[in-house]
Image (tube, helix red, strand yellow):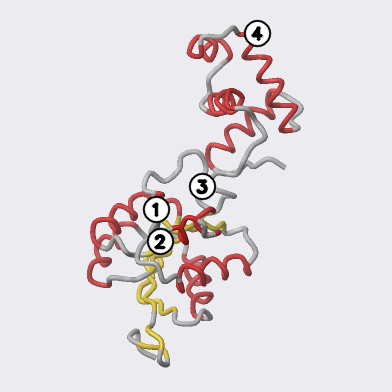
Amino acid sequence: MTDATIGRAKAIRVMVAVPNQLVRRGIADLLSSIDRAVVVAVVPSAAEVGERFAGIAPDVLLVDAEIAETVCGVVGEYRPGCRILVLGRRRHLGVRVLRQAHLACGYFAGCDPEADARAALTTVVHCHLPWPGSGAACASCTLRRSLRLPELPLSEREYDIFLRIGHGQGASHMAHELGISVKTVEFHRESIKRKLRIDSAHALLRAALAWQVGDYSAR
């Protein structure tokens, strides 16, 4: 098998950039079972992507979320048409969303079932669009929607306060910045706890911190 053709179909060249060696091997094995996918490079760091990306010119890049922001900058500079799939260890990308998320096709978590990972990989390998975000078909793609944060059953004000809790702000600080009373802030905090089924201030803080990094979603 060459990287030019698989049978009569054009092969899709895939580069895997994941620091963890066992995860790299598992992903490479999974890709080997997907029609037309040919793994042309497996690297452990953003630095190696920068060194080898231009010469390899892959069609698809699978990248760990921890190095994705740096790597996406490299991809955007050298090959804007490369389809990027982000792999993470958390439920979602979190509030600190990749600033170049518009360059990525989607996200899947290492804790997802193998069938979901295979479906995500198959979708990005077999996509016929020239680049992420090109056309209505891309906008409606289930994989593309995986980049979005999960929905929380909170009002806009409650969500703002939930984010501020995750940033470590106390009630007095929030009240001052939002131009409301501390009593109103506490009212919203209680409402958030009720809606998210959280039973203590400590549990609320843990949930808000976990949301920031992608480890929390509403039940």
User: Splitting the image into 4 quarters, where does residue 186 fall?
Assistant: top right
Query: Which kind of residue does numbered mark 4 sit on?
Result: Lys
How much space separates mark 1 and mark 2, taking CA atoms? 9 Å
Residue 79: % across, % down: 27, 63
Q: Which mark is residue 205?
A: none
Task: Report the residue marked by disc 1.
Answer: 68
The residue wearing badge 2 is 84
Vertical arrangement, residue 2 with respect to residue 205, above or below: below
Three-letter residue code for mark 2 = Ile
Query: Tag 1: residue type?
Result: Ala
Q: Is 25 on the left-hand or right-hand side of 162?
A: left
Of labels 1 and 2, the one closer to you? 2
> Is tag 2's residue or tag 4's residue first in the polypeptide sequence?
2
Residue located at (51% from left, 14% from top): 178
**SS for callout 1:** helix
The answer to whether residue 86 is above or below residue 2 is: above
Tell me which label, 3 or 4, sits earlier in the chain: 3
Are discs 1 and 2 less than 8 Å apart at CB?
Answer: yes
Q: CA distance from mark 3 to mark 1?
A: 11 Å
Residue 68 percent location from the top left of the image: 39, 53
Of the image marks 1 and 2, the number of the one nearer the N terminus: 1
For label 4, the residue is 183
Q: Residues within 10 Å of mark 1 (few under 14, many from 20)?
A: many
Q: Work out whether mark 4 precedes mark 1 in sequence or the reverse, and give the earlier one.
A: 1
